[in-house]
Structure formats: structure tokens, C-alpha cells
Image (cartoon, rainbow, N blue to C red):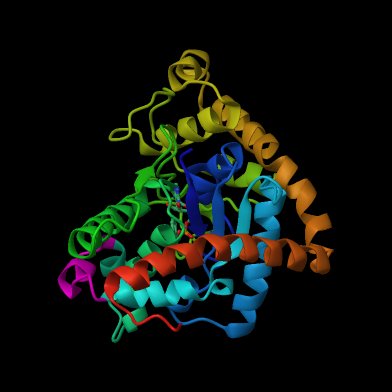
Amino acid sequence: MSRQFSGIQPTGDMHLGNFVGAVGRWVQDQDDGLFCVVDLHAMTLPYDPAELTAGTRRLAALLLAAGLDPDRCTLFVQSHVPVVTELTWILNCVATVGELRRMTQFKEKGHGQESVSAGLLDYPVLMAADILLYDSDEVPVGEDQIQHVELTRDLATRFNHRFGDTLVVPKATVPPVGARIKDLQNPTAKMSKSVDSPQGTILVLDDPKVITKKVKSAVTDSDTAVRFDVEQKPGVSNLLALLSVATGRAIPDLEAEYGTSGYGTFKAAVAEALVEYLRPTRGRYEALVADPAELTRSLARGATKAEAIASATMDRVRSATGLLPTT
Ligand code: TYM
């Protein structure tokens, strides 16, 4: 059986792009998958330690609320399995500085900064270690992470070539619709936690009234046709993609229904569908954060399950790379 692994950063609150591009798919296809709150990745940019602790708990609770079931999959916190940093070091000796400097996200996040942490440059190697530590076959992500998964493939292939067949070479999977959800106020940019565009970003825990307001004020164009055309009509196309994911209906079908309805009617339908799509998660979240002991137990259980897979991989890696065994 093919094993899924994916992760999400506890930075800011989970938004609709995360949900559509990744988390919603994890839930649908969760059996035997591993899903991780990547707290070590969140340290690559300046951050507040207390907020990292609180954000990690909130995000784990939100993933459970979204439908990840610890009886069916493994949900854990990245730093609870510390050998990931050992594998990162070993992969650092396989990766080159040149290939890391070419990563689009490094260039974007480092752009205009006077100094960037070595951790930011190394971010994709830590991500490769996540994926390779758990012998992952498939990595369900949004479009912005494809380049990092490609680098992971390159590192695994290079490692295997140098040290013998040791690591599973994974592949990224992206959703057919919604791999890059756009900001509602600026529909050529992706919806993102780091961009300061609260009106253009729908949070998974936003109140229904807030969701409706954000959708109704989404930037469209001066035309009136509801048609999927990313170049000419980025705003409308983004809303069509969201409506398609939230209702499970194909885009041509939605174009046929709303093509001439006018933007007001169309936006009302999008808002209603999104409220319903996110309602179950919102409903379950409050109960989950109210029981911190249960959350701690679920995460400890996840870490134990993840650790068992990780330690078998590390035995293979240490032996292949020539590190002296302790016994
Ligand atoms: P992060 O935390 O930025 O995002 C989590 C997931 O959400 C997807 N995503 C989107 N999908 C569609 N439209 C958008 N606007 C949008 N914004 C975000 C991301 O592609 C991602 O799948 N480096 C990763 C976390 C990570 C990871 C891993 C992922 C660490 N280790 C191992 C997979 C495997 C990140 O920062 O994702």
C-alpha cells in the first residue's frame, strides 16, 4: 500500500488554501497516512516562542477537528521525533548550497531581508528529511510545495546512488482543482498566511458571517460572465474552483448553472457552499481545544507510532552511510 505523508506549519491560522490544497485531501485519504505539525520549520523566520507552543496545539486540534482520526492515521508534532534533525544533517551533506539557493520559496521569503537564517536556506532539506524518514510514497501538497518534493526526490535518488538503495523516492500529488487558491483581494497571488491581506484570506475558523462578507467583497472584473479563464478572469476562476471543491461539482457544470446569473447570485452561492464546507470543522474545534489532556494523549500516541517507522529508517541510513553502531 502506498504511504502518504504531509505536513503543515503552525504559523498563523489555517486558511482555506491549506484546507483545499492539502488538509481536506489528507482527511479523505487518511488511512495509514502520517500527518505532521512542522514546528521546526516554523523556527526559520523570526517568531515568538509562546506563540509557537500555542499555535502548535491549536493547529493539532484543528487537524483533528477537520477529521483526521488517530485510530486511522498518525498525527504528530515534528519535533517529537527528534531524529528528523539527524537525517537533515546527513542529507545536508548530500544537498548542495546551489540547489537550495535556487528554491523559489527561499528566494521569496528571503527577498528584501538584510540577513536570513541558515535554517531558511536549509528549510527544504528538513522537509526532505520529514518525507524520507517515514518511507513516504506520496506527498499530498498544494502547488507551492511541488518544487520541494522534487528536490526531495533528487536527494533520495542521489543518496541511493551514493550509498546503495536505502530511501524510498516519493512523489508529490496535487488536487485537480484548487492546487493554488488565490487571495480574494488579489487573485493573481496565492492565498497565504504570511501576506498581510486579512480580507483576501478566508480562515478555516472564520465565522460564517465573516466568510460571506469576504466572498461578497472578492475582487472579480468588470465583465458579468461566470466563466473559468485563469488569465482573463482570475478572480471569477478562483471562486469557481472554490465552489467546485466545496460542492464536489465539476467546473463546466457550475459554468452552465451560473454563467449568466450575475456575480451577486454567484458569490452568494460560493459563500453558502464555503460556510457549509467548513461548518463541521468549526463545530468540532471548540470541544477539542477545551480538552488539552486528550490532545496531549493523541499527539503522544502519534509520536510513538511515527518514532517506530523513523527508527527503522535511521538504522538503514546510519549503516549505509558508515556511522559506527553503538553496540
Ligand atoms: P504550509 O504550512 O505553508 O502549507 C500547508 C499545505 O497547504 C498548501 N497550501 C495551499 N494549497 C493551495 N492553495 C494555497 N493558496 C495554499 N497555501 C498553502 C501547501 O502547499 C501545503 O501542502 N513546507 C510545508 C510544510 C512541510 C511539508 C513537509 C509538507 C514540512 N514538511 C513534508 C509536505 C511534506 C509548508 O510550509 O506548508
- Residue 32 highlighted magenta (yes or no): no
Instruction: Give the residue displayed 54% in from the left and 68% down from the top.
Output: 78
Depth check: 145 or 163 in front?
163
Q: Report x, y in % for residue 242.
A: 51, 35
Q: Report x, y in % for residue 93.
A: 24, 76
Q: Which residues are magenta?
A: 93-104
Instruction: Give the residue displayed 74% in from the left and 49% down from the top.
Output: 282
Quarter of the rendering containing residue 171: top left
Q: Report x, y in % for residue 259.
A: 46, 17
* 39 to the left or right of 69: left
Q: Can residue 111 be seen?
A: no
Instruction: Give the residue displayed 28% in from the left and 35% down from the top.
Output: 231
Q: Report x, y in % for residue 10.
A: 56, 67
Up-down: is 179 above or below 168? above
Depth check: 144 or 151 in front?
151
Quarter of the rendering containing residue 294: bottom right
Depth check: 67 or 301 in front?
301
* 307 to the left or right of 209: left
* 307 to the left or right of 90: right
